[in-house]
Amino acid sequence: MVKTILFLFVTVFSFSQNKDQEHYIYFSGAIDIRNATVGSTPTNNKPAADLLYQFGMVGQNFEVNIGYENFKAIHFDKYSIGIGYHFPLYGYVFGKQIKTVFIPSIEPSLIGRWGAEWQCTSSHLSIGGNLSLRWFLSDKVAIEWLTNFLPRTDLCARYPEIHPSIPVISSNYLKIIYKI
């Protein structure tokens, strides 16, 4: 395991170039597209807001962020800390260069549940992962497509007969980022 981690760090650092290194601080807001438009099974297929807020810092292509997700329709919230690495890419739209960044990250989380269905407030630890594509529209504004994979320990704890093992739920967010 240690050799694998060491190999990954050496590989990442050997392919990173100084001109592509990023350094900035940002705030962002995101919405789960599927739940906002058509809903999901937990919302009885009715649209509901699932919002994600983050504060992040990027230095030498490493990103650390803290986040809060609130999905009131199903009495769910999540506090998280994400750690990721930026892989700068460049694309062209109508002949204009658009900076794009691919960001894989790991995200330890604390899931909170409440309401009559839960009979009390409960908290559950989980470690998820993210895959993101971030497009810079200007020097200060970017949009991002974020896919989150979260092992839902809360569902396994509350419904062991339905979820005998921990299900991994994926969510897709459209995120707007403002660089400070």
Image (cartoon, helix red, strand yellow):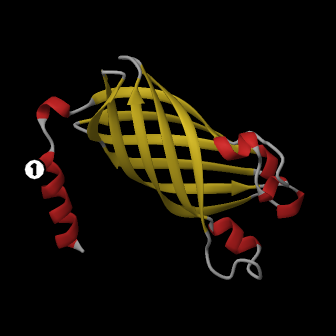
Quadrant of residue 111 within the rendered picture: bottom right
Q: Quadrant of the N terminus?
A: bottom left
**In this rendering, position of residue 123 left or right of residue 107:** right
Where residue 149 sits in the image (x, y, percent)?
53, 59
Residue at 27% across, 38% down: 89
Where residue 167 sits in the image (x, y, percent)?
62, 71
**In this rendering, position of residue 109 left or right of residue 21:** right
Could you tell me which secondary element the residue under label 1 belongs to?
helix
Where residue 142 sits in the image (x, y, percent)?
44, 26
Where residue 113 sits in the image (x, y, percent)?
74, 56
Quadrant of residue 62 within the rendered picture: top left
Eyeballing the image, is 167 above or below 148?
Answer: below
**In this rendering, position of residue 48 left or right of residue 97:** right
Quadrant of residue 153 within the rendered picture: bottom right
Residue at image mark 1 = 14
Residue 125 visible within the image: yes
Report the amino acid beneath label 1: Ser
